[in-house]
Image: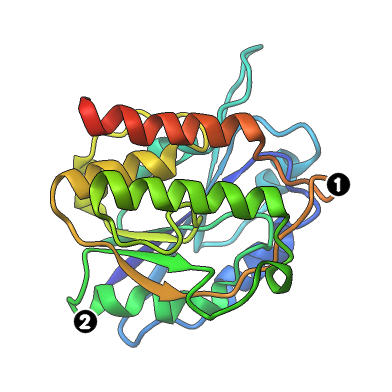
């Protein structure tokens, strides 16, 4: 079985090489091969040049031609890559070292065994406190609000709706007909899956939060958009 790993990139030159090394080295369940699709959304910090220089048979790079347009976000990067995915399962990997590819076997395991169609990697199932994860109080509160809202509106039963580690059957993800452009990818897929009655399976994963000073891009506005996305899909399309 081929598993596909999509890595959206925007100005991640400080961590990009290390992330790719970890993704290539991460153990997979027996019988699995990986394909890696790295999508640059218009980086200006050298990430694009670095990706252009890569000559690895297991890594496919997709470079956004901005032509004076604004860079595109995480949601758009995922939608663009999804058109070229060959694997039966697809995992979303951030390029900032907050999530550890060493968890791949745990994430893909329920998919390979047929136990799940969708797996979310929860940062909270390990019993870690906010401080142990390095998570700011604002980020923690936003996560609690989003997870709570998803559980109330959709009976999702999630401990970590906003986790970046999400794994899907490829054809299922394609069938959701995503519209997201930025970080609203997470609530859009959660809402659409729950509306179909598809159970989301959670497994514990490692997490090491980074700060705005070290390049974290999500902002308070993105949290508001995520909340609105959950509300919007509850009442319509």
Q: Is residue 189 above or below residue 224?
A: below
Foreground residue, 78 or 236?
236
* Snapshot colouring: rainbow
Quadrant of the frame with the N terminus = bottom left
Q: Quadrant of residue 137?
A: bottom right
Q: Is residue 141 above or below residue 128?
A: above
Percent x, y of residue 236 = 21, 25
Find numbered disc 2 in the image and state the secondary structure of the residue it sits on: loop
Farthest-out residue, top: 68
Q: Residue at x 20, y 62 (%)?
A: 199
- The residue that label 1 is drawn on is 213
Q: Which residue is drawn at 39% across and 31% down?
A: 229
Q: In this view, does 73 lie to the left or right of 201?
A: right
Gap between marks 2 and 1, in whole Å?
41 Å
Percent x, y of residue 44 = 77, 31
Q: Residue at x 72, y 66 (%)?
A: 18
Q: In this view, does 19 lie to the left or right of 105?
A: right
Does any portion of residue 7 appear in the rendered image?
A: no
Q: Which residue is drawn at 35% across and 74% down?
A: 108
Q: In this view, does 223 lie above or below 138?
A: above
Farthest-out residue, right: 213
* Tally of numbered discs: 2
Find numbered disc 1 in the image and state the secondary structure of the residue it sits on: loop
- The residue that label 2 is drawn on is 113
Does any portion of residue 233 appear in the rendered image?
A: yes
**Crowd around label 1: few <14 · some 14–19 · many ≥20 (10 Å):** few
Q: In this view, does 107 lie to the left or right of 214?
A: left
Res 28 label: none
Percent x, y of residue 194 = 22, 49
């Amino acid at each position: 079985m081929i598993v596909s790993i999509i890595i959206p990139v925007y100005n991640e030159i400080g961590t990009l090489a290390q992330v790719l090394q970890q993704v290539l080295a991460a153990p997979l369940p027996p019988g699995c091969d990986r394909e890696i699709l790295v999508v640059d959304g218009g980086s200006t910090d050298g990430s694009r040049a670095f990706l252009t220089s890569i000559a690895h048979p297991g890594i496919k790079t997709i470079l956004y031609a901005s032509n004076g347009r604004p860079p595109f976000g995480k949601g758009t990067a995922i939608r663009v890559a999804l058109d070229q995915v060959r694997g039966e399962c697809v995992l979303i990997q951030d390029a900032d070292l907050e999530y550890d590819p060493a968890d791949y076997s745990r994430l893909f395991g329920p998919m390979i065994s047929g136990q799940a169609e969708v797996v979310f990697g929860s940062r909270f199932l390990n019993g870690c406190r906010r401080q142990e994860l390095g998570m700011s109080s604002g980020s923690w509160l936003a996560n609690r609000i989003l997870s709570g809202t998803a559980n109330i509106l959709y009976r999702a039963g999630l401990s970590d709706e906003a986790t970046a580690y999400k794994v899907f059957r490829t054809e299922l993800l394609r069938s959701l007909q995503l519209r997201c452009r930025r970080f609203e990818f997470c609530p859009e897929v959660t809402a659409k899956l729950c509306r179909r009655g598809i159970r989301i399976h959670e497994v514990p994963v490692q997490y090491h939060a980074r700060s705005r000073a070290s390049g974290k891009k999500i902002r308070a506005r993105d949290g508001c958009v995520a909340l609105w996305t959950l509300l919007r899909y509850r009442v319509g399309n």
